[in-house]
Image (tube, rainbow, N blue to C red):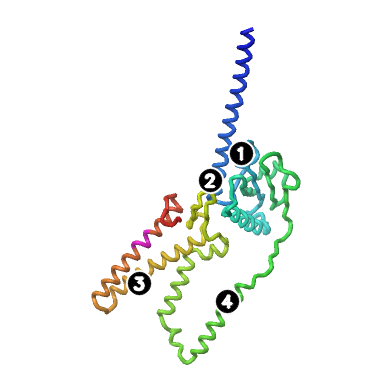
Amino acid sequence: MFGKLYSTLFFILFFCHEPSDAQRKKETLLSEKVTQMMDWTSKRSVIRMNGEKFRRFVKAPPRNYSVFIMFTALQPQRQCGVCKQADEEFHVLANSWHYSSAFTNRIFFASVDFDEGSDVFQMLNMNSAPTFLHFPPKGKPRRSDTYELQIRVIRPPNYAGPLLLGFLLAVIGGLAYLRRNNLEFLFNKNVWAFSALCFALIMTSGQMWNHIRGPPYAHKNPNTGQVSYIHGSSQAQFVAETHIVLLFNGAVTAGIILLCEAATSDIDTGKRKIMCVAGMCLVMLCFSWLLSIFRAKYHGYPYSFLMG
């Protein structure tokens, strides 16, 4: 009687304990996978995958997140023009999701290039690119989860740029016509130096990258409410980051100009000292802030003075 009772209790305890260990291992593995996916997403909105990453993070269980994957062929020898256009749009979509307030760790965007994951193409019997495939948290992709893009993407023309350029040229031409009898300003070296300096500061601050990529102005963490003005990855930036770098570059340049003027001008000694001190302060302070931004982006150091 008691022997049967002990056997029953041992059976229950043994088999109740076993699933508990398996469940803990499953949860640990799932947590590691989600953490790794979030780490990749923080550096690049579209995760680049090869065969090994695809099998581990997409095909193999456990998985409680969805993955939208673009299968593409971006290498020049593939001559896939539509792949490049689709890749740009896919990155815009992934960036919009990454920096939206609804962002969670349940949806990720990834890409598999044919030259980096040809085994994945063979595994899925895929012979065209670009192809978009949704992998749900459970089960296999259905037919409705697949979309093959076989058409050339055509956008309506954007006349904003040419119109703005035409307006600017018209203003400049009008001013030149009004002052046609007094055009000495065109030969003023300070005017051309200031114009060249402004152009250099705008280009070196990253305005062209913003124009091409269209990043958000800043990022607000939906969980903590903290606003980041500097992107944590060296592969991306925010618009606010461009303005900050532009301001610091301009301040450093102004400091150098003040130092040069203090050394070469004929004004009284007191004003020259003030110019020298102001120039040194601008150069040292703003250049140190620029170095802090560089260290934060490329070495992972904190930059709390730029976070609100």
Q: Secondary structure at mark 1?
A: helix
Q: Secondary structure at mark 2?
A: helix
Circles 3 and 1: CB atoms closer than 8 Å? no
Q: Earlier in the sequence, mark 1 or mark 4?
A: 1
- CA–CA distance between discs 3 and 4? 31 Å
Q: Earlier in the sequence, mark 3 or mark 1?
A: 1
Front residue of this view, candidates 248 and 17: 17
Residue drawn where x is 52% and y is 89% of the image: 177
Front residue of this view, candidates 35 and 6: 6
Which span is picked out in magenta?
Answer: 284-288
Q: Earlier in the sequence, mark 1 or mark 2?
A: 2
Circles 2 and 3: CB atoms closer than 8 Å? no
Circle 2 residue: 39
Q: Sort mark 3 into few (<14), some (14-19) or many (20+) by Cα contacts within 10 Å.
A: some
Q: Which mark is residue 165?
A: 4
Q: Secondary structure at mark 3?
A: helix
Q: Earlier in the sequence, mark 2 or mark 4?
A: 2
- CA–CA distance between discs 1 and 4? 51 Å
Circle 1 residue: 56
**What percent of the width, then of the height, locates residue 299?**
43, 50
Q: Amino acid at mark 1?
A: Arg
Q: Amino acid at mark 2?
A: Asp
Q: Amino acid at mark 4?
A: Leu
Q: Sort mark 1 into few (<14), some (14-19) or many (20+) by Cα contacts within 10 Å.
A: few
Q: Sort mark 4 into few (<14), some (14-19) or many (20+) by Cα contacts within 10 Å.
A: few
How would you classify the magenta stretch by its main secondary structure?
Answer: helix
Q: Quadrant of residue 19?
A: top right
Circle 3 residue: 257
Front residue of this view, candidates 80 and 169: 169
- CA–CA distance between discs 2 and 4? 42 Å
Circles 2 and 4: CB atoms closer than 8 Å? no
